[in-house]
């Protein structure tokens, strides 16, 4: 049985609150920013991700990081959260540079999203050789080779499996068959997580004889809308649209509206934000595949804390995938409006 996001969050906070209380600490009530304000820093953790400021997915993920930082601050924990700037969006090199900077600071642990099968290898090996615990979260290469990308544990969903689940459900729900054409909107073609989702979708649909076409866009929503609009200006017989995240879904819906296409072909997506929630509620989008981003950020920091505080080995935590449609959004509707 799968527990809800709220229940997981409650249990995680309750357990770690009890642990801190036993150690003579209590949760702080001060406002948490991207760096928690510990009076006496005993443990310093870096969280390095490829989050782009324009991508709403990272709001809840970063909220999870900051919630853990606030909870652990009384025990001397400082968490430094480092994403990408607007000018760095989509840059693997920029994230690798941030990781290398974090390693040079010799922290007590690092959480990092690994969005390339090869670019992070050297830095990850350096961290492991220095004895720095590393928790990968949100993104790792499909069938990762530990000799190339070593890390201690992973927190997140398996993106390839999520793509497979998405395609299997869509094939049944939308009656896809040989000769049909579907479109995938990929807003970060260099992101290994999205590539894994795409590969999972293709692994199901291509053997069925379904023609899978990919529209590569970017994190720029406006330019993505233009690309999708241009595609649909000359392609009218699309049976379904697969979006790989919240930015892609805005680009797909915007492009369809620009071409005055009504009704829309069935649309699916990944992850959940307020815009995706709205699209599902009003029927523009059939469903989304959720990976519980708050838990990814929260649990990644907690794994590092346990390793530093007690020497416990980090373990894999799988936060998804879960299919969310109009009938199964439940309390997540309120959470996405008010925040965790």
Image (cartoon, grey):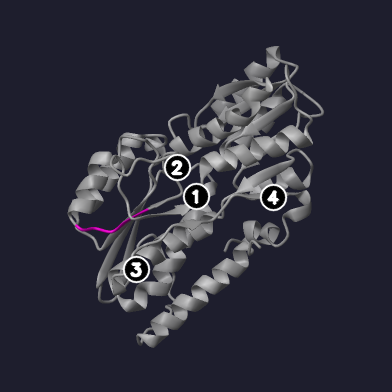
Q: Are marks 3 and 2 in contact (CB under 8 Å)?
A: no
Helix, strand or loop under label 2: loop
In the rendered view, would you say 109 is above or below 199?
below
- Ranked by sequence position, the earlier of labels 1 and 2 is 2
The location of residue 64, given as percent across then percent down, is: 48, 61
Give the CA separation, mark 1 to mark 3. Answer: 22 Å
Residue 116 sits in quarter: top left
Q: Which residues are magenta?
A: 131-135
Could one spot residue 26 in this view of the protein?
no
Where does the image place residue 49, in percent across and percent down from the top left?
Answer: 39, 47
| Label whose residue precedes the other's in the sequence (1 or 4) | 1
Question: Main SS of the magenta segment?
Answer: loop
- Quarter of the image where one finds residue 93: top left
Q: Find out whether the residues at labels 1 and 2 contact each other: C-beta distance under 8 Å.
A: yes
Residue at the far front: name it: 207
Instruction: Please give the label number shown on residue 305.
Output: 3
- Residue at the (41%, 81%) spot, across then down: 19
* Residue that carries the numbered disc 1 in the rendered image: 58
Position of residue 28 measured from the top left corner of the image (x, y, whole percent): 42, 78
Q: CA distance from mark 1 to mark 4?
A: 19 Å
Pointers 1 and 4 in contact (C-beta within 8 Å): no
Question: CA–CA distance between discs 3 and 4?
Answer: 32 Å
Q: Residue at x 28, y 47 (%)?
A: 99
Pair 3/2: label in front: 3
* Sequence-first tag of 1 and 3: 1
Name the mark nearer the viewer: 1 or 4: 4
Query: Pointer 4: what residue?
Result: 324
- Which one is nearer the viewer's eye here, 31 or 195? 195
Name the residue tied to disc 2.
52
Choose the circle earlier in sequence order: 4 or 2. 2
């Amino acid at each position: 049985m799968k527990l809800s996001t709220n229940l997981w969050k409650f249990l995680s906070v309750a357990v770690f609150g009890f642990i801190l209380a036993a150690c003579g600490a209590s949760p702080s009530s001060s406002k948490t920013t991207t760096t928690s304000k510990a009076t006496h820093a005993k443990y310093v953790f870096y969280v390095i991700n490829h989050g782009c400021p324009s991508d709403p997915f990272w709001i809840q993920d970063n909220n999870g990081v900051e919630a853990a930082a606030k909870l652990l601050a009384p025990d001397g924990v400082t968490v430094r959260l480092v994403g990408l700037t607007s000018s760095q969006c989509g840059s693997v090199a920029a994230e690798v540079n941030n990781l290398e900077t974090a390693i040079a600071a010799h922290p007590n642990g690092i959480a990092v999203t690994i969005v390339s099968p090869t670019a992070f290898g050297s830095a990850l090996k350096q961290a492991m050789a220095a004895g720095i615990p590393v928790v990968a979260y949100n993104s790792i290469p499909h069938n990762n080779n530990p000799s190339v990308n070593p890390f201690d544990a992973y927190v997140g969903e398996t993106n390839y499996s999520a793509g497979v689940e998405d395609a299997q459900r869509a094939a049944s729900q939308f009656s896809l068959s040989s000769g049909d054409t579907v479109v995938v909107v990929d807003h970060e073609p260099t992101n290994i997580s999205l590539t894994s989702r795409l590969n999972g979708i293709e692994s199901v649909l291509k053997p069925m004889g379904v023609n899978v076409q990919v529209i590569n866009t970017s994190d720029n929503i406006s330019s993505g809308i233009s690309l999708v609009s241009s595609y649909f200006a000359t392609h009218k017989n699309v049976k379904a649209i697969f979006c790989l995240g919240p930015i892609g879904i805005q680009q797909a819906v915007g492009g369809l509206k620009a071409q005055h296409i009504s009704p829309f072909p069935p649309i699916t997506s990944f992850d959940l934000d307020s815009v995706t929630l709205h699209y599902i509620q009003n029927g523009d989008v059939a469903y989304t595949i959720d990976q519980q981003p708050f838990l990814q950020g929260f649990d990644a920091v907690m794994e590092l804390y346990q390793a530093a505080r007690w020497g416990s080995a980090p373990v894999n935590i799988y936060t998804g995938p879960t299919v969310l449609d109009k009938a199964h959004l439940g309390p997540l509707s309120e959470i996405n409006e008010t925040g965790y």
